[in-house]
């Protein structure tokens, strides 16, 4: 008889519940992790609300910190009992997308050819990590050992939001001396703010409607913060830059208004780096787009995954270049995950990120 574990399962739109499921069998290239800490992502809330479709009965979650419980027969270079993380994106390492250097868009394993977001498997196309155990595919590509001196909570942001936020800064091509605006200072935007500073931007402007988030944005490296509930952020950014505009504008919310504001604050030839997950069509305003002649770039990012990416992000934390500790505002046991979803989904009590411990 298969051993059972507790797991947070998508039942139907509006319902994610804690249920018993069998502990997964381990294939040759897989690793079974005993999850020690995980968290809830904004994307999980989209799943809960039925805005992003997943199969009923799927275990959700894509940000695992854990210990290797069992290794597949073909996995080399790791040992059971090792502390590891795996990225939210778990590329196979051998697909066309991976070999083009874009593992996040890995189309491996889909019966109907390539599709966008193909590298995002955990809690999307296979069972995720809001559970006592999670099966990580292609373990040799995806498992990154955690340095002994780093705690679970210190590396909890690496699998997704740190990788995504930093990815938005990297894809924006930020250079030393740049001026960068980051629209929305939720967890992803805060990581983009930290990433912009680390990339060499000398003026980083954080925009949000919540004073508490703007306070954390300053701690993450914002030189100026703008409360968009009080002033027009486009006018304020143009004032701060003497009318020049910003070199890079990062969109970290996924709505028309912030996308458009990013376009309006760009200098000619500037880059709009889009991180938000949009749930409807976008329109591009003619004037801000300079009728298509503004030498602008619009780039999009799905967080890079794989063990080398995770190693680099943990190295940044280990070196003390960034401290994402302030982002964990609430802690829950896996048994209380439904309560955690209620808090996080309704953004109550100043929540930024929750730590879930089985």
Image (cartoon, helix red, strand yellow):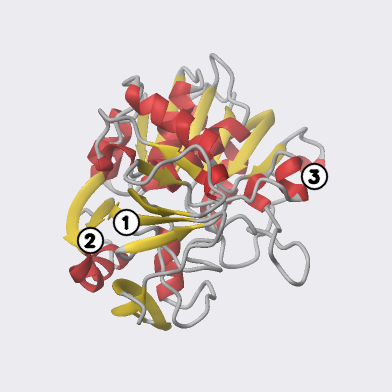
Quadrant into which the C terminus falls: bottom left
Q: Is residue 210 above or below residue 58?
A: above
Of labels 1 and 2, earlier in sequence is 1
Q: Residue at x 57, y 50 (%)?
A: 74
Mark 3 surroundings within 10 Å by alpha-carbon count, few (fewer than 14), some (14 through 19), many (20 or more): few
Gap in angstroms between the C-alphas marked 1 and 2: 9 Å
Mark on residue 358?
2
Locate residue 136, reporting x and y percent: 48, 56
Which residue is outermost to the top? Answer: 177
Kindly state the secondary structure of the residue where label 1 is placed: strand
Locate residue 17, reporting x and y percent: 30, 79
Q: Which of 126 and 118 lies nearest the eye of the viewer? A: 126
Residue tagged by mark 3? 291
Give yes or no for contact between labels 3 and 2 (Cβ–Cβ under 8 Å).
no
Mark on residue 271?
none
Looking at the image, is mark 1 or mark 3 nearer the viewer?
A: 1
Quadrant into which the N terminus falls: bottom left
Residue tagged by mark 1? 34
Give yes or no for contact between labels 1 and 2 (Cβ–Cβ under 8 Å).
yes
Any part of residue 35 in sight = yes
Locate residue 272, reporting x and y percent: 62, 39
Side of 91 relative to 354 (left or right): right
Mark 1 surroundings within 10 Å by alpha-carbon count, few (fewer than 14), some (14 through 19), many (20 or more): many
Q: Residue at x 52, y 30 (%)?
A: 238
């Amino acid at each position: 008889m298969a051993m059972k574990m507790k797991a947070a399962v998508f039942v139907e739109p509006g319902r994610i519940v804690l249920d018993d499921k069998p502990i997964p069998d381990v294939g040759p290239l897989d690793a079974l992790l005993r999850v020690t800490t995980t968290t809830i992502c904004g994307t999980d809330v989209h799943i809960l609300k039925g805005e992003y479709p997943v199969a009923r009965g799927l275990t959700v979650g894509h940000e695992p910190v854990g210990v290797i419980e069992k290794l597949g027969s073909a996995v080399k270079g790791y040992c059971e009992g090792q502390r590891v993380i795996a990225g939210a994106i778990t590329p196979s390492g051998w697909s066309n997308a991976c070999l083009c250097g874009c593992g996040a868009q890995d189309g491996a394993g889909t019966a109907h050819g390539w599709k966008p977001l193909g590298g995002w498997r955990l809690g999307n196309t296979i069972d995720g990590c809001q559970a006592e155990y999670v099966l990580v595919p292609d373990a040799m590509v995806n498992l990154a050992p955690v340095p002994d001196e780093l705690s679970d909570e210190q590396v909890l942001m690496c699998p997704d939001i740190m990788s995504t936020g930093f990815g938005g800064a990297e894809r924006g091509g930020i250079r030393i001396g740049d001026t960068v605006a980051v629209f929305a200072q939720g967890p992803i935007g805060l990581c983009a703010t930290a990433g912009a500073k680390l990339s060499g931007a000398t003026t980083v402007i954080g925009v949000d409607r919540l004073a508490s988030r703007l306070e954390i944005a300053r701690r993450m490296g914002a030189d100026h913060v703008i409360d968009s509930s009080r002033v027009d952020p486009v006018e304020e950014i143009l004032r701060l830059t003497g009318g020049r505009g910003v070199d890079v504008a990062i969109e970290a919310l996924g709505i028309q208004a912030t996308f458009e504001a990013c376009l309006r604050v760009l200098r000619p030839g500037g880059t709009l780096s889009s991180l938000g997950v949009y749930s409807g069509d976008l329109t591009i305003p003619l004037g801000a787009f300079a009728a298509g002649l503004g030498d602008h770039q619009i780039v999009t990012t799905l967080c890079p995954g794989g063990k080398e990416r995770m190693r680099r992000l943990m190295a940044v934390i280990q070196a003390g270049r960034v401290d994402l500790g302030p982002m964990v505002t609430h802690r829950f046991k896996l048994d209380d995950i439904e309560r955690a979803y209620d808090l996080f989904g309704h953004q109550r009590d100043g929540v930024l990120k929750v730590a879930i411990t089985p």
